[in-house]
């Protein structure tokens, strides 16, 4: 799925229609995914950058069971064939998965340590 011209920028610039479209795509057949995705949508969707949006959109293309396996770390997103054919930033995918899993504080810690390592 391709993102619109507006979505190519930050999600903060998404139109209400685009946000509604993504919210609709967050409705899944598995209750567990519904709960996680609705929380994610409410808390993070408008703040995603373009790389994170592409990664999130790629996840939404997955069947529910594969999505849940990736979300619960039963399988790595790198082992999902459907994701291997799409182009997205792996760091952005990991950031989205961390936010989805509810471990967003780990992102801050990891980003801080990555910046230290990079600048040293």
Image (spheres, rainbow, N blue to C red):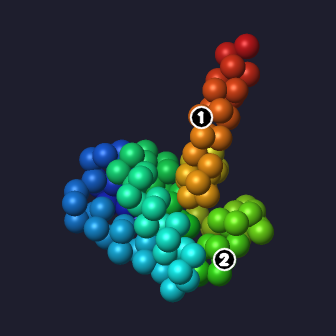
Provide the secondary structure element on which disc 1 rests: helix
Q: Position of residue 36 (x, y in %)?
A: 52, 66
> In the displayed structure, does residue 100 sit left or right of residue 66?
left
Badge nearest the viewer, 1 or 2: 1
Q: Farthest residue to the left: give it.
A: 16
Quadrant of the rendering where the N terminus is positioned = bottom left
Give the residue number, with chain letter if any, for mark 2: 66
Any part of residue 108 in sight: yes
Determine which of the numbered discs, if any, sits on residue 94 in the image: none
Say which residue appears at 43% left-offset and 51% top-offset.
44
Q: Quadrant of residue 19?
A: bottom left
Say which residue appears at 49% left-offset and 75% top-offset.
34
Determine which of the numbered discs, if any, sits on residue 108 in the image: 1
Q: Foreground: 50 or 23?
A: 23
Q: Quadrant of residue 91?
A: top right
Residues packed near mark 2 inside 10 Å, few (<14), some (14 to 19) or many (20 plus): some
> In the displayed structure, does residue 118 sit left or right of residue 14?
right
Any part of residue 57 in sight: no
Q: Earlier in the sequence, mark 1 or mark 2?
A: 2
Say which residue appears at 77% left-offset and 69% top-offset.
74
Q: Foreground: 69 or 88?
A: 69
Q: CA distance from mark 1 to mark 2?
A: 27 Å
Q: Farthest residue to the top: give it.
A: 120
Q: Position of residue 60 (x, y in %)?
A: 50, 71
Provide the secondary structure element on which disc 2 rests: helix
Count the labels in the image.
2
Q: Position of residue 49 (x, y in %)?
A: 43, 45
Residues packed near mark 1 inside 10 Å, few (<14), some (14 to 19) or many (20 plus): few
Say which residue appears at 70% left-offset and 26% top-offset.
113
């Amino acid at each position: 799925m391709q993102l619109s011209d507006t979505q190519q920028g930050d999600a903060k610039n998404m139109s209400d229609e685009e946000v509604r479209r993504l919210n609709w795509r967050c409705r899944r057949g598995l209750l567990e995914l519904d709960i996680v995705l609705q929380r994610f949508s409410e808390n993070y969707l408008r703040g995603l950058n373009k790389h994170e949006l592409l990664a999130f959109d790629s996840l939404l293309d997955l069947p529910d069971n594969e999505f849940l396996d990736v979300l619960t770390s039963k399988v790595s997103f790198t082992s999902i064939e459907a994701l291997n054919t799409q182009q997205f930033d792996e760091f952005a995918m990991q950031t989205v998965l961390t936010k989805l899993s509810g471990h967003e504080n780990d992102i801050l810690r990891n980003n801080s340590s990555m910046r230290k390592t990079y600048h040293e």
